[in-house]
Amino acid sequence: MKIGVYICECGINIASMVDVEKVMEFAKELPNVVVSRWYKFMCSDPGQDLIRQDIDELGLDRVIVAACSPRMHEPTFRELVEKCGVNPYCFEMVNIREQNSWVHTDKVQATKKAMTLIAGSVSRAALLEPLVRSRVGVTHEAMVIGGGVAGIQAALDIANNGYKVYLVEKSPTIGGRMAQLDKTFPTLDCSACILTPKMSNVGRNPNIELLTNTEVVKVDGYVGNFKITIRKNATCVIPDKCNACGDCADICPVIVPNEFDVGLSPRKAIYIAFPQAVPNKYLIDQNACIKCGLCVKSCEAEAIDLNLETVEETLEVGTIVMASGYDVFQAEIIEPYGFGKYDNVINGLQMERLFSSFGPTLGKVVKISNPHEAPEKVAFIHCVGSRNLQEGAKEYCSRVCCMYLIKQALLYKEKHPEAEVYLFYMDIRAFGKGFEEFYNRVQLHSGVTFVRGRVAEIYEKEDKTLTIRAEDTFLRRPVELDFDMVVLGVGLVAKEDLTELARLFNLSRSPDGFLLEAHPKLRPNDTFTDGVFLAGCVQGPKDIPDTVAQASGSAAKACEILSKDELLIEPITSIVNEDKCRGCGMCVEVCPYTAIELKVVNKFGHLVTVASVNEALCKGCGSCNAACLSGAIEQRHFKDNQILAIIETFTKGVVK
């Protein structure tokens, strides 16, 4: 047994609180340690060269690096020792940065703690066993969940690389939130003009199977071999027969609010979401339909069948891109603003629909209380529901709100130069390319009035005029102004059904409710479930360019998996001692990855039930090991004797 110990200064991150030279000298005296060194940055090429040279010259078969979190550089050092002929699972990393130097203020105590941690790891390293990665095949097809601009971009990128893609969208059409927008900031180009060609490309691409009105209901399998059960909700319209003539909608007697126009216009129970929808086919809203059969009689193409049923289907894919998007903050939570109470208090998405040429008013912004009049005074309120510690509001910044309100204020002022337009804000966050220039242009040259101060209250007078009470923090005085319309700059929030999607795919969520990436800086596209990647606002609020960029990045990650015939599976998994197992099933219940099942085996001439681990699904979390009542399960690389060796070293008090 030959162990090498290497201590990193990490600049001053470790060296400022840990005496690395003293730790190095201490490590030299530990059992089986044949070399101990320190270097400023062990992860750098010169630092790695020190390890490489010692393995070649001294024949090291165990390597310990005391540095930062294993989450940062354990893969780096594992790859290094493997290239030098040492099994990568005979490498041990000790965290003396996050768990030591960063949490201590006493250098003497921090140095002693570093010594103790390294001594424990040396004891464990002597008991480490070489492990071998297993191989699994890859299904060369992908699934993208969500048909907004993120899902569209990811699907097109994967399909254009020659792989089949299932694009699953819960609503009747792809396009997502971007399809509801009028202009995009800061260039003010038409949202539909950008998005519609991409939507058409999806519909025409032979490698993309578009599954609208479809939901994921069950997920099995693992990276390279996912089995996903989808539910295709009945539309009662046969797509191949429908020619979108509209006769069915003309005769339909049922009128309901149009969700695409955010409730500002009506639609029929049989409808197309919007003119550029893909697929451009009618469907029946099952919740609204009264089954009168008039649409069936009016359809010359015989495309309507009210007896069509929802069906389920299981698809096999190798990788998944999550791009299910976001919802807008429910502004009625901020009660003093009167959203949902006063007709002329609307949110930013509703204003987008009023601006849109195919919106409820064909691009004319009018009062909701009087659709024949354009508002003469309009107020835009920033940060509604964002950057707010009130109950029900969100603490984070939604990133896009400042810019879309400034854009809307400019658009309205350009259409109505005589109108008075006010923006109430705390501060302006113009972080993107061209954003600051756009903000300056509107502030200095458009005639829009900026008022720095949070709005306290909005109330309505008898003539439907809205009065805003706020504070002007520049003038240091309260203000009270009357307006014809108020637009609330609502933020972006996680979708309600994201909880169920996260459960199905075993994905973690951050405190803000969005899906959590594997690492905020180094792995922003990855999740902790191998083979599942994030794109767009499912990870957190983003503007369109950032959404598209991440979607392409996730598509590239997906193609990296799809391009391989086999994948190597991490061998740190649980193993079952069948002689000890009593088949109680406790491990099956606690496994968060559904990697354990009970099976019947012949033991000493008797059929008995024992647990069995699917190593491709197991992620080595150790839950089963902790729950096992008979001690029948152990976890490779973290076996009982390896953990007990560390504990014994700590309790001996090797550092004086």
Image (cartoon, rainbow, N blue to C red):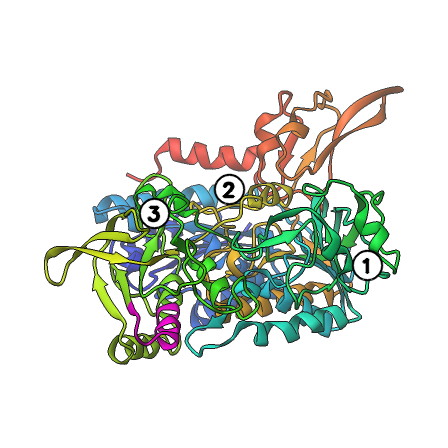
Q: Residue at x 56, y 53 (%)?
A: 527
Q: Name the residue under label 1.
A: 239
Residue type beneath disc 2? Arg
Please tell me which of labels 3 and 1 falls first in the chain: 3
Q: Name the residue under label 3.
A: 114
Question: In x, y percent, where is residue 278?
Answer: 70, 65
Residue 123 drawn in magenta: no
SS category of the residue bearing label 2 = helix
Q: Nearer the viewer, mark 3 or mark 1?
A: 1
Q: Name the residue under label 2.
A: 124
433 and 220: which is toward the camera: 433
Q: Residue at x 47, y 72 (%)?
A: 184
Position of 628 with respect to 187 (left or right) is right
486 and 560: which is toward the camera: 486
Label 2 to label 1, Cα distance in Å?
Answer: 63 Å
Q: Which residue is drawn at 21% across and 47% down?
A: 105
Residue 418 drawn in magenta: yes
In what quadrant of the picture does the C terminus appear?
top left
Can you see residue 535? Answer: yes
Residue type beneath disc 3? Ala
**Label 1: few (<14), some (14–19) or many (≥20) C-alpha neighbours in 10 Å:** some
Please tell me which of labels 2 and 3 falls first in the chain: 3
- Tell me where the magenta segment starts and ends, as one range: 407-420
Instruction: State whether the magenta stretch is mostly helix, strand or loop.
Output: helix
Label 3 to label 1, Cα distance in Å?
Answer: 67 Å
Question: In x, y percent, where is residue 1?
Answer: 55, 49
SS category of the residue bearing label 3 = helix
Question: In x, y percent, where is residue 203?
Answer: 74, 68
**Label 3: few (<14), some (14–19) or many (≥20) C-alpha neighbours in 10 Å:** many
